[in-house]
Image (cartoon, rainbow, N blue to C red):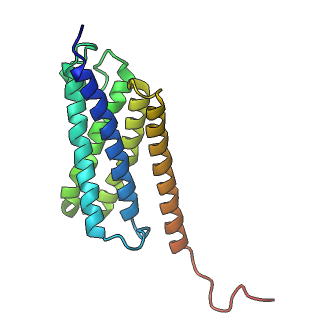
Amino acid sequence: MNDPTMWILARATGLVAYGLLAAAMLLGLALAGRARPPGLRPADVTEAHRTLSLLALVLTAVHGVALVLDRAVHIPLAALIVPGLSDYRAEWVAAGVIALWTALAVHVSFALRGVIGARVWRRLHMGAYAAFACATVHGLLAGTSSGSPAGIALYGGAVGLVAGATAWRAGVERRRRSPRPAPGAGGAA
């Protein structure tokens, strides 16, 4: 019988990394623009956002290494770096690799904001949506927990929360940018 330790480690770290990525997305959306809810200290939320992002990356790396060390499925080390090199569910594993590289670029941009400027930094941060989408596809189609009730709850809940927070933020931004009627305009006829 094969030792399931690496498979269990890979599964657990993949699921937790995905949850951390979703949480980092939600905190980033809470910080964005003028949409920040009252009572949240931006510095605290920013630090939590960065920390969750880093933890998601670290656990994703552990997830990948555990998959390479697992004997049940052969995934070469190079497949963690280059999308498409895995024989196991190649396109869905590639989606995970793309998610990792995209999330890493977004995370590294924290340190480069002063160099690249706020406008480029914001645009680069939009890549978090691509990372989240690729990670979702990877988990649903390459993962072994996606069909379980817990997997459905995790992926469905995360997508629902991120979509809802995105819609909320867009609504707040739209209301704040819309022109206000001039005093006395739009009143009684």
* Horizontal side of residue 132 vs 59, given as left or right: right
**Residue 110 visible (yes or no):** yes
From what the image shows, is residue 26 above or below residue 103? below
**Residue 97 visible (yes or no):** no
Q: Which of the two residues, 111 or 153, is positioned nearer the viewer here?
A: 153
* Horizontal side of residue 102 vs 65, given as left or right: right
Count up the numbered dots.
0
Q: Residue shown at 27%/38% (left/top)? A: 101
Quarter of the image where the N terminus is located = top left
Q: Position of residue 183 (x, y in %)?
A: 63, 91
Quarter of the image where the C terminus is located = bottom right
Q: Position of residue 31 (x, y in %)?
A: 36, 64
* Horizontal side of residue 42 vs 139, given as left or right: left
From what the image shows, is residue 181 above or below residue 74? below
Q: Which of the two residues, 17 or 120, is positioned nearer the viewer here?
A: 17
Point out the residue furthest to the right here: 189
Q: Position of residue 81 (x, y in %)?
A: 22, 29
Q: Residue shown at 51%/74% (left/top)? A: 176
Q: Quadrant of residue 136?
A: top left
From what the image shows, is residue 36 above or below residue 134? below
Q: Position of residue 119 (x, y in %)?
A: 32, 62
From what the image shows, is residue 72 above or below residue 23? above
Q: Residue shown at 57%/78% (left/top)? A: 179
Q: Residue shown at 78%/89% (left/top)? A: 188
Q: Quadrant of residue 18?
A: top left
Point out the residue furthest to the top here: 1
